[in-house]
Image: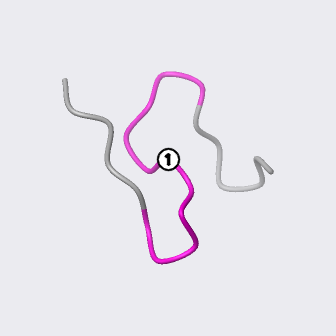
Amino acid sequence: MEVQYDAQGRMKYHPDYHPNHK
């Protein structure tokens, strides 16, 4: 599983990722 980041530099595809996650 690759960890990808959105434009904000946040992890998009990650087990601990949440839409509201800082």
Instruction: Identify the magenta region.
Output: 6-16
Residue 7 vs residue 20: left or right?
Answer: left
Residue 19 vs residue 22: left or right?
Answer: left
Q: Position of residue 6 (x, y in %)?
A: 43, 67
As rendered, which of 8 and 18 lies closer to the eye? 8
Q: Residue at x 21, y 32 (%)?
A: 2
Is 14 drawn above or below residue 7 in the view shown? Answer: above
Q: Residue at x 80, y 51 (%)?
A: 22
User: Which residue, as the protein is rendered here, is positioned at the far front?
Assistant: 9
Q: Residue at x 32, y 49 (%)?
A: 4
Majority secondary structure of magenta residues = loop
Q: Residue at x 49, y 47 (%)?
A: 11
- Residue topped by disc 1: 11
Residue 5 vs residue 20: left or right?
Answer: left
Q: Quadrant of residue 5?
A: bottom left
Q: Position of residue 14 (x, y in %)?
A: 44, 31
As rendered, which of 13 and 9 lies closer to the eye? 9
